[in-house]
Image: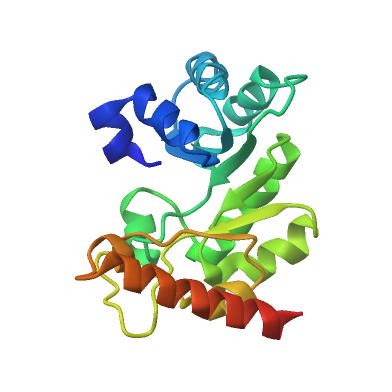
Amino acid sequence: MGNQLFTAEGPRAVKKLAGLGFGIFLDLKFHDIPNTVAHAVSAAAKLPKVRLMTLHTSGGYDMMRAAREAVAGKKNRPALLGVTILTSMDAPSLRQVGMSGTPASRAIALAQLAKKAGLDGVVASAHEARAIRRACGPKFLIVVPGVRPASSDANDQSRVATPAAAIHAGADYLVVGRPITAASNPREAALAIAAEIASAARRAK
């Protein structure tokens, strides 16, 4: 669940989906001072069936560590994922906000910082997934957004990948949005993407 739905409907949307039996990926990308993020994460972790939750790694080590400590010891706590570099950003975009280096080098460094802070994984494009896996180990979760079937438009994304490419790069989870929600037949689009994912997963074994 992203910012659009959560802003419109709030926690009741989480409860509604949880009531239907779904596990929730709460993609709110928290980014604030450590104390504020810690309280936000603690509150979000109390919502039903929240399995994954995001915060921005650019908030720094102290912020990420505070988030991790906010859920320490909680039974069935959600996995905390650090958003590295947004898939809409390329090297010129990074320079505009004062970040040097390539998106790949920054994403890897931020993933390592997230692991050091105790986060369970990161959100990163498929272009960086393999290198992050090598740097952070096999148990570190990697969620890949910007997933687009070959026939889809990239929209405002700069670093995209097909479902098959994301799986082969080592993704644990894929985030697929507009190729389904903006399709003329969302159900057919979802089924086609699911079939591509299943085929790629079989080949990856």
Say left or right for 31 vs 48: left
* Image quadrant in which the N terminus is located: top left
Q: Is residue 122 above or below residue 69?
A: below
Q: Quadrant of residue 155?
A: bottom left
Q: Position of residue 6 (x, y in %)?
A: 33, 32
Tell which residue pokes out farthest to the front in this image.
Answer: 20
* Image quadrant in which the C terminus is located: bottom right
Q: Is residue 35 visible?
A: yes
Choose between 194 and 38: the one closer to the eye.
Answer: 194
Choose between 162 and 113: the one closer to the eye.
Answer: 162
Looking at the image, which residue is at 42% across and 55% down?
Answer: 86
Q: Position of residue 178 (x, y in %)?
A: 29, 62
Say left or right for 66 vs 88: right
Choose between 13 and 56: the one closer to the eye.
Answer: 13
Q: Is residue 35 above or below residue 119?
A: above
Looking at the image, which residue is at 80% across and 60% down?
Answer: 138
Q: Position of residue 87 (x, y in %)?
A: 41, 61
Question: What is the total number of numbered labels drawn onto the structure image?
Answer: 0
Looking at the image, which residue is at 54% across and 26% down?
Answer: 48
Q: Quadrant of residue 69?
A: top right
